[in-house]
Image (tube, rainbow, N blue to C red):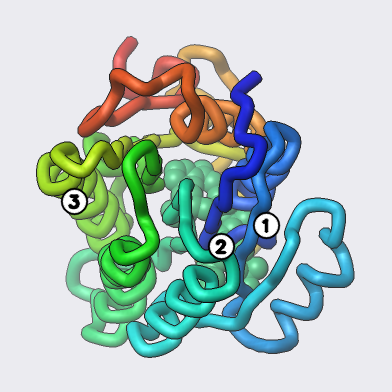
Amino acid sequence: MADLTGKIALVTGGGNGIGLASARALKAAGATVVTAGRNEKRAQDFRDNYDDVFDKVYVADAGSVPETNAFVEQVGKDYGRIDVIFANAGFGEPAPLGHITEENFDKQFNVNVKGVIFTVQAALPYLNEGASIVLNSSIANQLGFANFSVYAATKGAVKTLGKIMAAELVGKGIRVNVVSPGPIDTGFFGATGMDEKQQAEMGEYITNQVPMRRFGKAEEIGSYVAFLAGSGSTFMTGTEVEIDGGMATL
Ligand SMILES: NC(=O)c1ccc[n+]([C@@H]2O[C@H](COP(=O)([O-])OP(=O)(O)OC[C@H]3O[C@@H](n4cnc5c(N)ncnc54)[C@H](OP(=O)(O)O)[C@@H]3O)[C@@H](O)[C@H]2O)c1
């Protein structure tokens, strides 16, 4: 297991699913872990339920640049530095071509892309040599999931951002890598707006596309995020790691 003793780790979207499992893995490795809820109520939920995971829970909507800037700057001021970032907050709202609205587009790009860029940018003054940034993309960035064009485009942007950020920060000794999960059993599909029947049908369809014939567990992403954050991965930067039961490759 990675040793992150004394490291300050900032996780966006840390209160559920992949973010929570990653926060737990970072905490178990010894890091001080902080996150933000999208509003005061969500932040309080995370404080009440996960005080064993989070050292501090702030308030920031990941789709708001002013709130993201204020959150990250406050973490920097409170702890003096940031060693690990897991830019994870995100969601998908499917819509077939012909039904994509500007609102649908903006909501997904604001959280999934703008949120990632401004989280990292606001952290720059607090990132030092040895810091590790992990961005959460998706294998949707390379598969043809009908109705998920905008979501897939956001995740393609995240994958590319990871490479460019890695190139810009390599001279400072700061690493940037991207994880691309396959289908993971989290609140993601419930948050898409699909009803339970649609979710069940989609779940069955997706399971059949995965060579391992199952959804992944959030912990199977979290353990890799902790690995990328730690000293076991110090020669890795600018990479995308697919964690998908073989879905994109086999
Ligand atoms: N599950 C999958 O199959 C899968 C596959 C590939 C990639 N991913 C990516 O993994 C990331 C995490 O998703 P998940 O599967 O763990 O889903 P999840 O269980 O729904 O968790 C998403 C987290 O992000 C937070 N979040 C969403 N929008 C936010 C906003 N505007 N401001 C602040 N927080 C916000 C949510 O907060 P609330 O608790 O308040 O809703 C929640 O804590 C996403 O970027 C997703 O695209 C997921």
Q: Which residue is drawn at 52% across and 62% down?
A: 12
Say which mark, if any, is on residue 161: 3
Say which mark, if any, is on residue 13: 2
Residue 148's place in the image compared with 237, above or below, is below
Q: What amino acid is at disc 1? A: Asn
What distance separates the C-alpha of mark 1 from that of mark 2? 7 Å
Quadrant (top left/top right/bottom left/bottom right) for the N terminus: top right
Residue 173's place in the image compared with 200, above or below, is above
Q: What amino acid is at disc 2? A: Gly
Nearer the viewer's eye, disc 3 or disc 1?
Answer: 3
Residue 6's place in the image compared with 112, above or below, is above
Q: In this view, does 223 lie to the left or right of 103?
A: right
Residue 108 in the image, given as x and y percentages of width and height = 34, 71
Other-residue count near label 2 (Cα within 10 Å), few / some / many at <14 / 14–19 / ≥20: many
Circle 1 is placed at which residue position? 16
Q: What amino acid is at disc 3? A: Leu
Badges 3 and 2: C-beta atoms under 8 Å apart? no
Badge 2 element: loop
Q: Quadrant of residue 176?
A: top left
As rendered, which of 166 and 46 lies closer to the eye?
A: 166
